[in-house]
Amino acid sequence: MDKSISTSSIRSCAATSSRPCVLDAGCGYGRNLVHLLREGCQVFALDANAEGVEHVRRLSASLGTGLPDENFKVGPIERMPFGDCVADVVICNSVLHFARDDEHFRAMIGELWRVLAPGGMLFCRLGSRIGMDFQPVRGHIFVVGDGSEWFLVDEEMLLDLTDELDAILVDPLKTTIVQDYRCMTTWVLRKRHPDA
Ligand SMILES: C[S@@+](CC[C@H](N)C(=O)[O-])C[C@H]1O[C@@H](n2cnc3c(N)ncnc32)[C@H](O)[C@@H]1O
């Protein structure tokens, strides 16, 4: 996970809660959750891969968190079985490049935003075209360095989406370029309180 998604930034974001609620959308095998589970965060996680989710359940149990199995769900990000505004922090790391098209991408973003509480933060690390050129396939799908097809965003798209969500861009966009392969951009947003 990007180093900026640290426990301290999560705690500062969820300063009003002694036990911040963190939701990892597309958690995989939970590599970004180990320290959060150890730190006593209330973790929710979801992935389309049942094996990954089972692994995260066992990880949580082995750390003695006491979190119920129902916090860890198999399912699609575009239809998450979690309530509105449940999370102080939503993480989505290296997942959104799986979007099939614009509609799928927007459905996933809509859900990440729906489950985020006002004042909370969304941390996305996602494939982008910021800093490298890729062979276009269709729409926002491009061929990356290993020959696979990824949904890639660009700077304008992320800034437009930030405006559309009426979100606060917490940090300037930061991109890591992996030579001849891919670019990963970190996009961190805060959700405004309705009365702010
Ligand atoms: C590259 S892995 C990243 C896993 C984890 N976030 C990490 O940083 O280690 C991508 C994960 O996204 C999941 N995924 C892809 N599309 C998804 C979707 N629409 N809904 C839920 N999970 C999805 C895959 O099953 C896979 O576990």
Image (cartoon, rainbow, N blue to C red):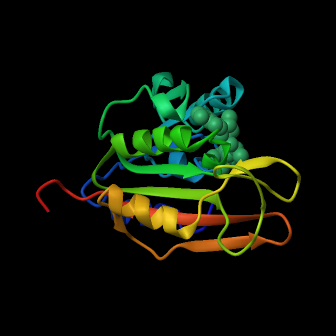
In screen coordinates, is 68 left or right of 137? left
Q: Position of residue 147 (x, y in %)?
A: 88, 51
In screen coordinates, is 103 left or right of 119? right
Q: Position of residue 11 (x, y in %)?
A: 38, 61
Vertical side of 78 occupied by 170: above or below:
below
Q: Which residue of the protein is positioned furthest toward the left in this rendering?
A: 195
Residue at image position (41%, 42%) is 110
Vertical side of 175 occupied by 41: above or below:
above
The quadrant of the picture showing ligand 1 is: top right
Q: Which residue of the protein is positioned furthest toward the front in this rendering?
A: 138
Residue at image position (45%, 30%) is 80
Viewer-proximal residue among 61 and 193: 193
Residue 165: name its quadrant. bottom left
Q: Is residue 6 visible?
A: no
Q: Position of residue 45 (x, y in %)?
A: 52, 36
Residue 129: name its quadrant. bottom right
Q: Is residue 68 visible?
A: yes
Instruction: Please state the total of marks drawn on the protein image.
Output: 0
Viewer-proximal residue among 80 and 104: 104
In screen coordinates, is 160 left or right of 143? left
Where's the N terminus, which quadrant? bottom right
Residue at image position (72%, 49%) is 150
Q: Position of residue 141 (x, y in %)?
A: 69, 49
